[in-house]
Structure formats: C-alpha cells, structure tokens
Image (cartoon, grey):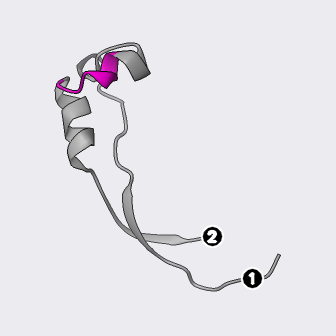
Amino acid sequence: IIKVRVAGICGSDVRYFLGENPWALHTLGKSTREDKNFILGHEVAFRMPEVVPW
C-alpha cells in the first residue's frame, strides 16, 4: 500500500481532455469532451510507509 502525496496530469492528458489527441477517439471510442466524469492523471508522487515481505 502506498500513500499518494500528489497527483497531476501530463501533456497527453490535457490533449485528451481538449479532444486534440488523435488517439482519444481510437482508444476511448468517443471524445472525452462528451464525458465530464472522465478521470485523467497518472503522474504521482508517493510515500511507502513500510515494506512488507511477501
């Protein structure tokens, strides 16, 4: 388990949101501008409180 400290979006996420990324229609099958509940963001910084052996 990790504790996310901050999360952000990258340039490709902005392009998806604005409908400017040509892969948006291909990968999502629709324009992201049509879906206001679409969650972007995959840039995270986290803290790992402890390491537990498997």
Q: Magenta segment: does it hold 21? A: yes
Q: Would residue 35 be visible to someone looking at this image? A: no
4 vs 43, left or right, is: right
The circle on residue 1 is: 2
Which of the 4 quarters of the picture holds residue 14?
A: top left
**Residue toward you, 20 or 34:** 20
Q: Is residue 47 left or right of residue 33?
A: right
Looking at the image, residue 1 sits to the left or right of residue 30; the answer is: right
Quadrant of the snapshot with the N terminus: bottom right
Quadrant showing the C terminus: bottom right
> Residue flagged by tag 1: what amino acid is it?
Val
Residue 43: % across, % down: 35, 58
Q: Are marks 2 and 1 in contact (CB under 8 Å)?
A: no
Q: Is residue 18 above or below residue 50?
A: above
Q: Earlier in the sequence, mark 2 or mark 1?
A: 2
Numbered disc 1: secondary structure: loop
Residue occupying image coordinates x 29% and y 16%: 31
| Range drawn in magenta | 20-25
**Residue 40 quadrant:** top left
Classify residue 37 as left or right of residue 48: left
